[in-house]
Amino acid sequence: MNKTVNQKAWFFVIPVFVLVAFNAIIPLMTVVNYAFQETFGNNVFMWEGTRWFKQIMLSERFHASLGRQFLFTFIILFIQIPLGIAIALTMPKEGIGVPVCLVLMSMPLLIPWNVVGAMWNIFALPDIGFLGHSLNALGFDYNFTQQIGDAWFTTILMDVWHWTSLVVLLSYAGLRSIQPAYYQAAEIDGASRWAIFTKIELPKMKKVLTIAILLRFMDSFMIYTEPFVLTGGGPGNATAFLSIDLVKMALGQFDLGPAAAMSLIYFFIVLLVCWVFYTLMMRNEEKS
Amino acid sequence: MSLELKNVEKKIGLDTHIYSTNLKLEKNTINILLGSTLAGKTTLMQIMAGLDKPTSGEIWFNNENVTGMKVQKRNVSMVYQQFINYPNFTVYDNIASPLKIIGVNSDETKQRVGKVAELLKLSGMLNKKPNELSGGQQQRTALARALIKDSDLILLDEPLANLDFKLREELREELPKLFENRDCIVVYATTEPSEALLLGGNTATLQEGKIIQYGKTLDTYNKPNSLVSAQVFSDPPMNIAKIKKSGDQCSFLQNDIQWKTKLNIKDGEYKVGIRPHNITTYKEGNNTLEIKGKVLISEISGSESLIHFTNGSLNWVSLSNGVFQKKVGDEMNLYMNTDEFVYFDQNERLVSNG
């Protein structure tokens, strides 16, 4: 082998390295640094070892917000994925309807997250909001600022409204990529509509659905802005999901050490779940 | 058993995809639809199968009008250019799927799958999923699914087009055997003349939605009824030149090469079609008529050499056995076999050949 050795090539890597260092490595290492130390301000730090990690792992407050987080993510995935596939299946396949549907579907995705929160806040207010007022007029005792169930209902509805489109667009792309010959072959076999869905469409959509579930898992697991604006985590701590709780701890109480430890644990949970899920889904794909 | 198209026509919007077509296919025959892409082969097959309805005209099967009858009731099977199998079924389940829908019991299914799998050399991979197989094996699975059902009509839409050369050769040789002793009509669409010749049977040449000629494959090849049919059935494309005939002397309009003909036709101008393999770089057998050429492109394909050359204002293609390396711009002599010339009149209808 005649490989030329030229160490100058490393210079090309420097800009990327500097960029990544500033936007990822340094902030992350700062958090790691905080997680092992105690500070009383004035840049005075004391070594604490793994104390904050133990404290967070054993804290009931963390368990509660983690539980809320998993429940929320599970519910919205359970609604958004089937709903998204169902909508994608009913969307037109050709003609003017295609661009119209695609644009309409992307609308919610284009709205800034804090605006979504503010919109739904006003929309759902029991006295003046269209949704809140209508529900009350219909005889429901609805008040998302005071009742836990209503707060959850509103937050979930908001997230479904905001993000189902993403699943729809991905599923639609997956469906469109199935060659017409598959449908013809199924027709020749005399397969039912349900069989076509389970035996052809679902397996063919497996990869995009994996991506859709991963994206929705990560986004919903790290959700902050929308519930912060909508409910502020309330009533009480009823909708204080992990990130809301984390910000409260870090900036509200200024417990930097425990907050840093919590964010690292948080980070590893997201990483672990994504890795396990992806590995399971792609287990049989590797061979091809 | 027979399948008959009566004045079948297919229009989509203002576009005519299939012009009025009459065709009768008999039982136990392989029928090849030969034509380039967009000639209407697939549309015609889908109409035959009942996957698509003709705009007008009728389809008769066994003296029964089946126009508009749903494909599920027609007992047909189809193999596509793409390898179409159920993605999360094993090979076994894929092959068994048509039987499952009809409701064949499991013992019989097992026996029939085993038989078909053996025929298609899939016995060792019945427990695998399609994405673990090579392209050739995937297409064999699709073929097995088509063969297991005892269909009345088996349609194959360029089944070998997506396979690499070796696999294509291999399957191509097996295909005629697969359809032997089957009580069915086979329709096979392809763009490749050599495939049609290899499969035998009958061939219909198609061009722009029209069937140009239908008959025994060899007859269609040897006696093209028109220039279009000859061109569809020639790969590389046929060389065409204008000629003049007076008495028993013929000559090209572009140059002064002359030859004698026994043709009993009126004097005047004609077009002559010369298949590339009837122009060779060496004198051989009846290839005696000499023509000078300047090499444009020279390519070697397998053990054959393709030489594109110019003579006067005409571009020609010659195909010779053996490997010849020619440089672009080389002057050389080539030899043609006048017995194999195909003569067409000014309207491009066959006058006579030989």
Image (cartoon, grey):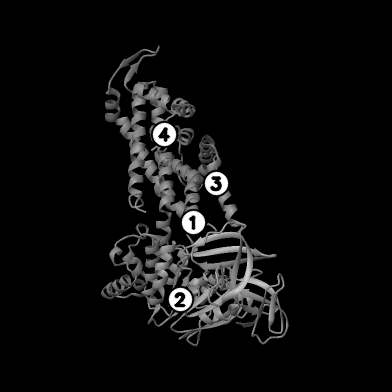
Quadrant location, the N terminus of chain B? bottom left
Q: Is residue B108 above or below residue A94?
A: below
Q: Say which residue label 3 marks.
A: A106
Q: Quadrant of residue B135?
A: bottom left
Q: Say which residue label 4 marks.
A: A235
Mark 4 or 1, closer to the camera: 1
Residue A226 in view here: yes
Crowd rating for badge 2 (residues with CA inside 10 Å; few <14, some 14–19, many 20+): many
Q: Chain of mark 3?
A: A
Q: Chain of mark 2?
A: B
**Is residue A177 rendered to the left or right of residue B144?**
right
Label 1 and label 2: CA atoms lie apart by: 33 Å
Label 4 and label 1: CA atoms lie apart by: 45 Å
Q: Given the image, on which type of amino acid does mark 3 rest?
A: Ser
Q: Given the image, on which type of amino acid does mark 2 rest?
A: Leu
Q: Say which residue label 1 marks.
A: A177
Who comes first in sequence, dot 1 or dot 3? 3
